[in-house]
Image (cartoon, helix red, strand yellow):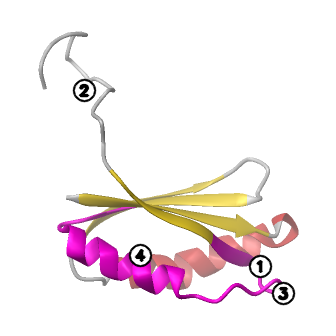
Amino acid sequence: MTTLLISLDLDPSRADEVVALLRSEMAPWMRHQPGFVSSHWFLADDRRHCTITVEFASESEATDVARATLALPSNPARSWNVARVDSVSDLNFAPRPGLRLGDSP
């Protein structure tokens, strides 16, 4: 599996508009991408940033979505813009519930 970490910069005065757009357009688009496994969407308390984690079945599928996301041109008049897209690896430092520290997963 490959995880994308997508960071969006938001106009905080238009954050409600962005959340509605993410819910109605971006999340459904993401769910329909080949290899989509899961996603989590986070809005910063200051409403200036949104962070999205998206898991894909393969690196190539994640790369295709990363390229498409990064291809969106920046537009200062828009309520949001893509700040960065990273492919990340889970280091598995957080123990799963029920495991004691030092136990193998």
Magenta segment: 54-82
Q: Which mark is residue 79?
A: 1
Question: Which residue is found at the position 31% from the left and 84% from the top?
Answer: 32
Residue 101 percent coordinates (x, y): 25, 10
Classify 10 Å Cα crowding around label 4: few (below 14), some (14-19), many (20 and above). some
Would you say residue 6 sits in the magenta stretch? Answer: no
Question: Which residue is found at the position 15% from the left and 13% from the top?
Answer: 103
Q: CA distance from mark 2 to mark 4?
A: 29 Å
Left or right: where 16 falls relative to 13: left
Residue 27 lies, with reference to residue 103, above or below; the image says: below
Between label 2 and label 4, give the one nearer the viewer.
4
Q: Which residue is mark 4?
A: 66
Q: Which mark is residue 96?
A: 2
Question: Which residue is found at the position 82% from the left and 73% from the top?
Answer: 14
- Which residue type carries mark 3? Ala
Q: Which residue is mark 3?
A: 77
Residue 97 percent coordinates (x, y): 26, 23
